[in-house]
Structure formats: structure tokens, C-alpha cells
């Protein structure tokens, strides 16, 4: 498929220049700084001089063995799963409902607008609100439960590990499912209308249309949602930190909260925080690559293989 | 035909019920926030969740404006930063994504992997390095370092690329070239309109994120005339025993209002039931 | 339409960018004037400066104030950066709250602080003259030299309900109640039992008693570079459990909704008292008592007496930058705030609530001299003069048992205590987990 004559490839480079330049100016130094500190002894406030440790990986070894770190990774995985599965399911469901022409849902616009709203509010406000909502011994949820007689006395939601995890997962779900839904709908809007019209003429019902036409075309966008949710989820920080500060007893401590605590909870262990972030980064990379491979477009891969084979045989351009 | 209609009606009822429930769930915290903006600190301390308004709105407003900062300045600054960030991010991300999709160049895949890698860097620690860097070069108390970094927005580039891969047909580009259009012009006049839903959604997200961003502006902006709205709201929280919660909630409500406006303006691109394909086969 | 919008927005953007750059440039020119850079996390100290200038019309320095709230932990990083960067924008005077003051007076950031002596203040004489509470001096001293002082006194007392005291013991006299609840925790819990028998909770939650225990323990969390659990603090584990089992509290979390509600009797049981300094009375309880004059809610039904053990809670310390180019001026300001015990010193106004005109909120101050000549009677306390109790309470408190890690360590400790008190862990497990958290997050030796 090569185009003969003028090569437009240079525009690929030209158009990417702003991104690269900006990145180098604003992000390269901080990123390199972080990577380097992971191998040094930099800790404590206001210090800028550091030296590379005699055992460069000492920080990594310490973090690896750090019980709290491992707990935080476990928590992150658990809470993320509890958050993401309902989120993507509901988002896909709503997308299906709102983009199926047969179900012309009145006030669809209003619903979409309202459902996205939780994403607008700051995490800090939400954390405070939910903290009060589940307050003990008096709080709205407890009041309702007791009044309707569903429990004998008020429950301390903040003290039990699984309710704490559940609430954090719920808040994350609630803040982001609208976001996912909107992204998916935007993706659907990019699909050619004629495809739907043709399918309807052929007598396909709504489910068939969704699974055979919408979803496959949406694959690239779904991959986007998956990857960004995963990356965002692994970096879950605001809510766990502000809601119960990682409590009770580290039940809601996520990896990002752990890193933050290493750097800011009094000992300013910047070197260990950096090592920990590098470890989390590696985990993210591995998982993302796995996801990419899983969701790769099989047809495109086949096509590319054919191309390469043709080229090797000296075939036609 | 009849059974089809019946099942459609049941589906629609289910849909309506679920949507109404979700809408109430979504509105709930806003309602509480607005209610709290009308109550005074002590009422809020007794019970943070309220469904009925109080009487302290004017009082909270007086406290809010009586502090040593000016909310209008905050609004203006926030507006500059958020608008600038959004425009930079959306435009340049689309440009970069287009480069990744429309052209075949040697470093293309490597570059994409690089962008993904950047995306995966945890945000916090690079935040520390960032503000230390800004202090070192003395670039504090300016709104520029809050806007310019947005030109490189890996998440958005990723999204635009996925979107373009799904919706762009290179024939359009080819026909534009035949018509004699330069590459840049093709991008601005033909590609961008195709990307409207994508741009609108990402614009909303970026604007919201930038508007609500507290930490980096808080550290970089120390002069009062440069404060953004979230900074001003955080100033209302003094020592834990002196926080004026009523005014805090009022401040929070005011901070959220512009977001609603922007959201409503941009959301028509998402609500529109008409697909925006560019090719008529 | 869209194109015009884009043009308009870009023009606005360009204009404002130019504006902000321009404005940044202008500020540099003003550096020639006499300026004092003041950093604070509330507008308390900046407001004091207005009064200072009013009293000293020929003080021709301008105050360049930077206020960054401590929420989201943003004050300290910014302050640290500004101190480290130095130069014309570095703080000349900066404030530190009790939660993190040790870092700036004795810990990692202490080298930025200027000894008060070097500011032209006759420290020894002034300290004696003003009769400053010793704990404030302890906290503000670096190797014996005074580098920071607080203006507020935050020595704690026991604040109790008059009507409940009368109901259980027949009298609400402060001296009597003092002897009932102390000295020492044993007597306190005897009183708790007597109150419980009549259906009252002695305090709202275990957090109330923790501040007193923490503040009065002989040694702090770090001894000889190792984590150390003082026996009085370790006792808190069992105390918390016991109070829960015997129903001495309403099991509230301090600063939670239910804790505030207990101040106006809206909890499950009526609560007898709270532990706290004067600011708890004036800034927290008064508003939450369900009324604003005697007879409404619990307003007017309170009194203060000495606590079973001495402690302090909170406060703001004022520190000067050792590299400040305007040390004389800074010295004058700081002396006025912290060591001036005359009737025109800040503390006199602060104590009597007359800083911004008559009728403001009264508060206890660091200077005993000032409190002795000030009027601390409050309607909220049924006409009692709060200074009578808070002056000796300040002498009780000690600052020798604090470390710069306290905020974090305390939060881990209370988390574990909560787990143990509610039966979710054994005592040994709770202590082990506590040590693990401290080691993992603070890299301290256990």
C-alpha cells in the first residue's frame, strides 16, 4: 500500500514536534529525577545532594520486602476490580440503550448529562460527604438502617475492612461510570450511520446490532477505556487518601497512597518513594502490554503479515 | 409485530427506571453541597448531610467575600488556565494522533509506545520534580507553567488515536491531496470537524480536571492576585477549629457552576443522535 | 460562529498570557521597597499586622502576605521550597502549627530559623516579664536557643456540664469537680462509674481522652533513635477498650458529626465533659451548643476545671528566617506578637477579644502576665473566668514529649487502638501492626 511519488511521512514527524518539545521541557527533568533518585540515598527535607547507593537496588529490595507495600498492591487490585467490573458493564449497557434507535429514550440528553455529573465534583468534597454519610454512631445511612429496623444498632462502617473497601470502590465506580459511558457514546457516534440502517433493513434486532456492529467497531475505544481505567485505577489516590486515609488498618491503602506516605508522612523518604513508583510503573507496563496483545485486531495483524511476506518476495508495491 | 412492541415497552420501562435511579444517585452530592452552602458552620458540623436548605446563605456570602481575597479574580484566573489548557491539549493531541494514524513513518510505533509509557508514569512523584524544577528556574506565580505542559497530553493522544483509527478513512485525505490541499490545511479543515465528538468529550474532561486542580497551582502560585478558585476555597479552611464550613460549601458550589455551564455547552455534541460521518458512500 | 468563537478565545488567551507575564515582571521592580514577607496558613497573623501598623504609624514596612491553607498538605512543601530557594521572595516571618512546628524549630528545617536573640530581643528578660508558659518555650527552642514562640496558650482543661454535676454530686463548683475527676486517671474512672450509673457518659469518645494522655506522657514516641511506646500511652489500649465496654462514652470519633452533636445533648447519652484548650470552648463548643445565650441549648451550662493530667493541644508558633535582610523590623513584629505583655501588646488584645474592636472572641494567651490582668469571664461558662483555670493549666503542660513524626505516628496508633478496643485484634497483634506501620512508612527503628 505504499504511495509512490511524494512521501508524506515527514509530516508524521513534523506534527509530533509540539508534543515532544513540550514533553522534553516540562516532563523529562522531573521524570529522570524520579528515576535517578530511586537509586540514591536522598531522604529528608530540603536536601538536594545525594549519592548513588553502593547497592543501587537497595531501595527496590526494601520496598519489595515492605509488608505495607504488598498490602497496598493487593488492596489496589481488589478495589479496582470491585470498581471496574460494575463500571464497564453499566457503561456498556447504558451506551447500548442510548444509541439504539429503536429505544428512543425521551430525555436521553438529560440523563446523559446527569449521569456524567459526579465526575465534575472534586474528590475531596466527595470524600468528606461519604465520610459523613456512613458516619458512626450517627449518620444518614445508619439512621435509615436503624429506623427501618434492618439492623439493631448503628454499624461502624469505617472500622470494618470490607465495608471500607466497598465504599471506596463504590465511590470510584460512581465517579467514573458516567465518564466511561460518554467516551463510549462518542465512539459510537463515529460509526457510520449507513451501517446501522443497512442492518435494520436486514431485520436485525437491537441485541444483534449491538453485538455484531457496534461493539466490534467500538473495540478501539473499549481498549482505551480499559487501559486508562487500569492505569487510573492503579494510581487511585484521592479517594482512598481523603476518605479514611488508608484505614482502617491499611484496608484501603492503595499503592499511590503508599508512595505518597513514603514521601510525605514525616520522614521524607524520597528515594524509597521513587523506587516504589518505578515498581508500580513496571507493573502497569506489563499489564498494559498484556491488554494490548489481547485486544489486538487480528485482521490487521494478518494483513501486516501478508504485506511483509509480499515485500520479502519482492512483490508489487 | 405485536410481541416486538411489547418487549420494547418492557425494555423502555426498565431503562427509564434505571436511568431515573442513577440520575438521583448522581445529583445527590450536588444537592447536599448546595444545601450546605445555605447552612452555617455549626449546623454542618452537627450533621453534614442535609436535604433541606438553611438560612445562612447571605451570611456565608459575606464571609466568603470578607476574606482577604477576591473571588472574581479567582474565577478569572481559573478561566484562563482551564481554557488555555483545554485548547492546547485538544488541538495538539489531535495533531499528534493524526500524525500517528495518517502517516507511515519509521519511528511511528516506537513513538506511540513512548507516549503510552509516559501515560503510565504515576502522577505524583513527577509532580514533586515538576514544582522543584519550576522553583529552580524561578517560574512561579505565572499561569503559563500551568497551561503549557498540556500540549503534551498522552491520555488524550491515545484516545484521539483510537478514535481516528475507528472512524477515519484515508481516502478522505487522499482526495484532499488531489484537490491540492496542503497537509496542515487538510488537518484543520477536514479532519478536525470529523473529530468533533471526540474533541468535545475530551475538552470537557480536560476543562474539569484543570478547573478542579488544586495541588500544583497551590504550590506554584503564592501571590494573591494569581490564585485560582480552588485555592481560594482551600483558604477558607483554616485551622480545623476555625473552618467556616458554610462558606466552604458556598465556595465549592460557585466553583462548580462554571463547569456546569461549559458542560452544557459542549454536551450537545455528545447528545446528538446524528452520527458525524464524513463519507457518503 | 465557531470560527469567531475561536478567534475571540485566542485573543483573550493571548491578552491574558501577556498580562500575566507582564504582571510578573512588575513585581520584581517593587523589591526595592521595604517589604516583610509573611507566610501563614490562616489569616490570623496577617490580620494582626493591621493592628500593628495602626499602633506603629511610623513603621514603614509593607507586609507581603502569603497564605496557604494546610489542607491537602500543601503549606509545608511550598514553605520548604520558598525557604530553600532563598532570595527576595523567601519568607522573613513564617508560622508553624503545633502539628508540625517541631520540624521547624528542632527538626529538619530548624536551620532556617533565626534565634530570637539575633533579632534584637532581650529574650531572658522578656520571657520572665511575660511569664510565658514553659511548654511553648520548650517547643520553640533549638538547642537551648529560642527560635519560635506561640501567641496562643493551648494548655488544656476539663470542660464539664454544670447541671449534670449537680445531678450526680449535688454541686457544680470547679474546685470540687477538679478533685472528683483527678488528679490521675484512677479517680477519673471512679467518677466515670458514678456518672454511668445515672445514665451519663463522662466523655464523648476515646479521642477526647487521647489528647490528654498523649500530651502528658513522660516520654515521646522516639527515645534514643528508636520507637518507644510510653507505658502511659500503652495503657490507652486498655482504657479505650474498658470505656467502650462499660459505656463510659458514646463511641464517637472526634471532629465527626456525632461528636459535635454531643455538645448539645443530641447523642445517645448525655455527655458530661470535653477535654480541650480555650479555643475548643470559644471556637467549637460555643457554636455547637445549640444556642447563643444562656438558657438556649447547653449554652451557659458549662464550667472549666483542672484536668486529671496536664496537656496542650494546638497552637501557632511564629518563626523568623535566619537569612532575612530585615531582621530589626522582623524582631519588632515578633516581639510585639509573642513577648509584649503590656496593654498594647498583641496578647492583651487577643486575650480580651479586642483586636478588631470590642466584643470579639476571647482566648487564652501564652503570657501568664497578660492573662492575670485580663478578663476571661464568659457567659458560656455561666460567668466563670476561664483564665483562673487555664493559667495553672498552662504550667502543667509539657512540650518535651513531642517529635516531628507525631502526626503520623498518632494516626497509626489510634487506628490500632480502635481495632483492639472493638475486639478485632489482640493487644499483641495491635502493637505489632503498629510497629510494622511505623517501620514501613517512616523508616524508624523499632
Image (tube, helix red, strand yellow):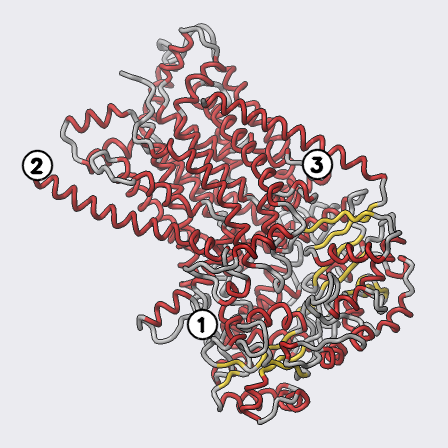
The answer to whether C93 is drawn above or below residue C183 in the figure is: above
Q: Which mark is residue A247?
A: none
**Residue underneath mark 2:** B1
Image point 75% across, 76% down: which residue? C375
**Residue underneath mark 1:** A137
User: How busy is the neighbourhood of tag 2: few (under 14 within 10 Å), some, or many (20 plus)?
Assistant: few
In primary-sequence order, the first of circles 2 and 3 is 2
Position of residue A268 measured from the top left corner of the image (x, y, whole percent)? 66, 54
**Residue underneath mark 3:** B139
Same chain under badges 2 and 3? The reply is yes
Label 2, secondary structure: give it. Answer: loop
User: How busy is the neighbourhood of tag 3: few (under 14 within 10 Å), some, or many (20 plus)?
Assistant: some
Among all residues in the image, which is located at the extreme left? B2
Image point 71% across, 53% down: which residue? A45
The answer to whether C89 is drawn above or below residue A6 in the figure is: below
Q: Tell me, yes or no, whether the two marked residues, 1 and 3, touch with CB atoms within 8 Å.
A: no
Q: Chain of mark 3?
A: B
Query: In the image, is B54 to the left or to the right of A178?
Result: right
Label 1, secondary structure: give it. Answer: loop
Image point 51% across, 75% down: which residue? C262
User: How busy is the neighbourhood of tag 1: few (under 14 within 10 Å), some, or many (20 plus)?
Assistant: many
Residue C298 or residue A146, whichever sits in front = C298
Q: Is residue C443 visible?
A: yes
Find the distance from the CA under tag 2 to the CA under tag 3.
69 Å
Position of residue B22 measured from the top left corner of the image (x, y, whole percent)? 33, 50
Residue C130 or residue C209, whichever sits in front = C130
For residue C305, what is the image quadrant?
bottom right
For residue B225, what is the image quadrant?
top right
Position of residue A92 measured from the top left corner of the image (x, y, whole percent)? 31, 41
Amino acid at each position: 500500500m505504499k504511495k509512490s511519488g511524494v512521501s508524506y511521512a515527514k509530516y508524521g514527524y513534523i506534527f509530533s514536534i509540539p508534543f515532544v518539545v513540550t514533553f522534553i521541557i516540562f516532563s523529562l527533568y522531573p521524570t529522570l529525577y524520579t528515576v535517578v533518585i530511586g537509586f540514591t540515598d536522598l531522604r529528608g527535607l530540603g536536601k538536594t545532594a545525594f549519592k548513588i547507593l553502593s547497592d543501587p537496588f537497595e531501595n527496590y529490595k526494601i520496598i519489595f520486602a515492605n509488608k505495607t507495600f504488598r498490602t497496598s498492591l493487593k488492596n489496589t487490585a481488589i478495589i479496582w476490580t470491585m470498581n471496574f467490573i460494575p463500571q464497564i458493564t453499566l457503561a456498556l449497557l447504558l451506551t447500548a440503550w442510548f444509541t439504539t434507535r429503536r429505544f428512543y429514550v425521551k430525555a436521553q440528553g438529560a440523563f446523559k448529562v446527569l449521569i456524567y455529573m459526579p465526575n465534575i465534583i472534586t474528590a475531596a468534597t466527595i470524600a468528606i460527604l461519604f465520610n459523613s454519610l456512613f458516619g458512626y454512631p450517627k449518620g444518614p445511612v445508619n439512621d435509615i438502617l436503624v429506623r427501618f429496623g434492618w439492623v439493631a444498632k448503628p454499624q461502624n462502617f469505617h472500622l470494618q475492612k470490607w465495608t471500607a473497601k466497598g465504599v471506596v470502590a463504590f465511590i470510584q465506580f460512581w465517579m467514573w461510570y458516567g465518564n466511561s459511558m460518554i467516551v463510549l457514546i462518542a465512539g459510537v457516534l463515529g460509526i457510520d450511520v449507513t451501517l446501522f440502517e443497512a442492518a435494520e433493513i436486514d431485520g436485525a434486532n437491537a441485541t444483534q446490532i449491538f453485538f455484531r456492529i457496534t461493539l466490534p467497531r467500538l473495540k478501539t475505544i473499549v481498549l482505551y477505556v480499559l487501559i486508562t481505567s487500569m492505569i487510573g485505577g492503579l494510581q487511585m489516590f484521592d479517594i482512598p487518601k481523603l476518605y479514611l486515609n488508608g484505614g482502617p488498618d491499611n484496608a484501603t491503602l492503595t499503592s499511590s497512597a503508599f508512595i505518597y506516605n513514603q514521601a510525605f508522612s514525616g520522614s521524607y523518604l524520597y528515594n524509597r518513594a521513587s523506587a516504589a513508583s518505578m515498581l508500580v510503573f513496571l507493573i502497569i507496563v506489563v499489564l498494559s502490554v498484556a491488554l494490548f496483545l489481547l485486544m489486538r485486531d487480528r485482521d490487521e495483524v494478518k494483513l501486516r503479515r501478508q504485506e511483509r511476506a509480499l515485500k520479502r518476495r519482492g512483490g508489487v508495491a | 409485530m405485536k410481541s416486538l412492541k411489547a418487549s420494547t415497552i418492557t425494555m423502555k420501562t426498565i431503562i427509564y427506571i434505571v436511568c431515573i435511579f442513577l440520575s438521583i444517585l448522581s445529583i445527590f452530592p450536588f444537592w447536599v453541597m448546595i444545601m450546605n452552602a445555605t447552612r452555617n458552620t455549626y449546623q454542618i458540623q452537627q450533621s453534614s448531610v442535609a436535604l433541606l436548605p438553611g438560612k445562612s446563605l447571605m451570611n456565608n456570602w459575606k464571609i466568603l467575600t470578607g476574606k482577604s481575597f477576591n473571588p472574581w479574580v479567582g474565577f478569572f484566573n481559573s478561566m484562563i488556565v482551564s481554557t488555555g489548557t483545554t485548547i492546547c491539549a485538544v488541538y495538539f493531541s489531535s495533531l499528534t494522533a493524526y500524525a500517528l494514524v495518517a502517516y507511515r513513518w519509521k519511528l511511528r510505533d516506537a513513538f506511540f509506545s513512548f507516549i503510552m509509557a509516559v501515560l503510565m508514569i504515576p502522577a505524583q512523584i513527577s509532580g514533586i520534580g515538576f514544582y522543584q524544577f519550576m522553583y529552580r528556574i524561578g517560574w512561579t506565580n505565572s499561569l503559563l507553567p500551568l497551561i503549557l505542559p498540556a500540549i503534551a497530553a498522552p491520555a488524550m493522544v491515545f484516545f484521539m488515536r483510537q478514535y481516528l483509527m475507528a472512524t477515519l478513512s484515508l481516502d478522505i485525505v487522499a482526495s484532499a491531496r488531489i484537490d491540492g490541499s496542503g497537509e496542515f490545511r487538510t488537518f484543520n479543515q477536514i479532519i478536525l470537524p470529523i473529530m468533533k465528538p471526540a474533541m468535545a468529550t475530551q475538552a470537557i474532561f480536560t476543562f474539569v480536571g484543570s478547573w478542579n486542580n488544586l495541588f500544583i497551582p497551590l504550590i506554584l502560585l503564592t501571590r494573591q492576585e494569581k490564585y485560582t478558585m480552588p485555592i481560594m476555597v482551600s483558604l477558607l479552611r483554616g485551622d480545623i477549629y476555625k473552618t467556616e464550613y458554610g462558606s466552604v460549601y458556598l465556595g465549592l458550589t460557585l466553583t462548580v457552576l462554571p463547569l456546569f455551564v461549559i458542560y452544557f455547552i459542549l454536551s450537545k455534541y455528545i447528545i446528538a443522535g446524528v452520527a458525524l460521518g464524513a463519507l457518503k458512500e | 460562529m465557531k470560527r469567531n468563537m475561536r478567534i475571540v478565545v485566542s485573543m483573550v488567551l493571548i491578552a491574558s498570557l501577556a498580562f500575566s507575564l507582564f504582571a510578573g515582571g512588575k513585581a520584581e521592580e517593587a523589591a526595592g521597597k521595604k517589604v516583610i514577607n509573611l507566610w501563614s496558613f490562616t489569616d490570623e497573623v496577617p490580620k494582626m499586622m493591621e493592628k500593628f501598623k495602626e499602633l506603629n504609624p511610623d513603621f514603614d514596612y509593607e507586609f507581603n502576605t502569603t497564605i496557604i491553607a494546610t489542607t491537602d498538605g500543601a503549606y509545608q512543601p511550598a514553605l520548604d521550597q520558598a525557604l530553600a530557594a532563598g532570595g527576595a521572595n523567601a519568607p522573613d516571618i513564617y508560622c508553624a502549627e503545633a502539628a508540625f512546628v517541631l520540624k521547624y524549630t528542632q527538626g529538619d528545617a530548624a536551620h532556617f530559623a533565626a534565634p530570637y536573640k539575633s533579632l534584637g530581643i532581650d529574650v531572658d528578660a522578656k520571657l520572665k516579664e511575660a511569664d510565658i508558659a514553659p511548654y511553648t518555650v520548650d517547643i520553640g527552642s533549638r538547642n537551648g536557643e529560642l527560635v519560635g514562640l506561640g501567641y496562643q496558650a493551648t494548655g488544656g482543661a476539663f470542660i464539664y456540664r454544670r447541671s449534670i454535676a449537680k445531678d450526680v454530686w449535688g454541686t457544680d463548683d470547679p474546685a470540687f469537680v477538679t478533685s472528683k475527676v483527678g488528679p490521675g486517671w484512677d479517680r477519673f474512672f471512679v467518677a466515670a462509674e458514678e456518672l454511668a450509673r445515672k445514665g451519663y457518659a463522662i466523655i464523648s469518645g476515646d479521642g477526647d481522652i487521647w489528647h490528654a494522655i498523649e500530651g502528658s506522657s513522660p516520654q515521646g514516641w522516639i527515645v534514643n533513635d528508636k520507637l518507644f511506646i510510653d507505658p502511659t500511652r500503652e495503657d490507652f489500649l486498655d482504657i479505650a477498650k474498658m470505656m467502650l465496654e462499660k459505656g463510659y462514652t458514646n463511641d464517637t470519633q472526634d471532629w465527626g458529626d456525632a461528636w459535635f452533636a454531643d455538645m448539645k445533648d443530641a447523642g445517645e447519652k448525655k455527655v458530661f465533659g470535653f477535654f480541650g484548650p480555650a479555643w475548643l470552648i470559644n471556637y467549637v463548643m460555643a457554636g455547637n451548643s445549640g444556642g447563643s445565650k444562656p438558657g438556649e441549648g447547653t449554652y451557659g451550662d458549662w464550667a472549666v476545671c483542672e484536668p486529671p493530667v496536664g496537656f496542650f493541644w494546638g497552637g501557632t508558633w511564629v518563626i523568623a528566617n535566619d537569612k532575612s535582610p530585615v531582621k530589626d523590623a522582623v524582631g519588632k513584629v515578633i516581639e510585639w506578637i509573642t513577648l509584649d505583655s503590656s496593654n498594647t501588646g498583641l496578647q492583651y488584645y487577643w486575650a480580651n477579644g479586642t483586636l478588631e474592636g470590642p466584643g470579639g472572641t476571647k482566648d487564652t494567651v501564652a503570657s501568664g502576665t497578660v492573662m492575670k490582668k485580663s478578663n476571661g469571664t464568659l457567659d458560656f461558662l455561666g460567668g466563670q473566668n476561664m483564665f483562673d483555670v487555664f493559667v495553672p493549666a498552662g504550667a502543667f503542660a509539657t512540650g518535651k514529649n513531642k517529635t516531628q513524626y507525631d502526626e503520623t505516628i498518632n494516626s497509626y496508633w489510634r487506628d490500632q487502638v480502635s481495632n483492639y478496643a472493638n475486639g478485632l485484634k489482640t493487644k499483641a497483634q495491635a502493637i505489632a501492626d503498629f510497629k510494622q506501620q511505623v517501620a514501613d512508612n517512616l523508616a524508624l527503628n523499632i
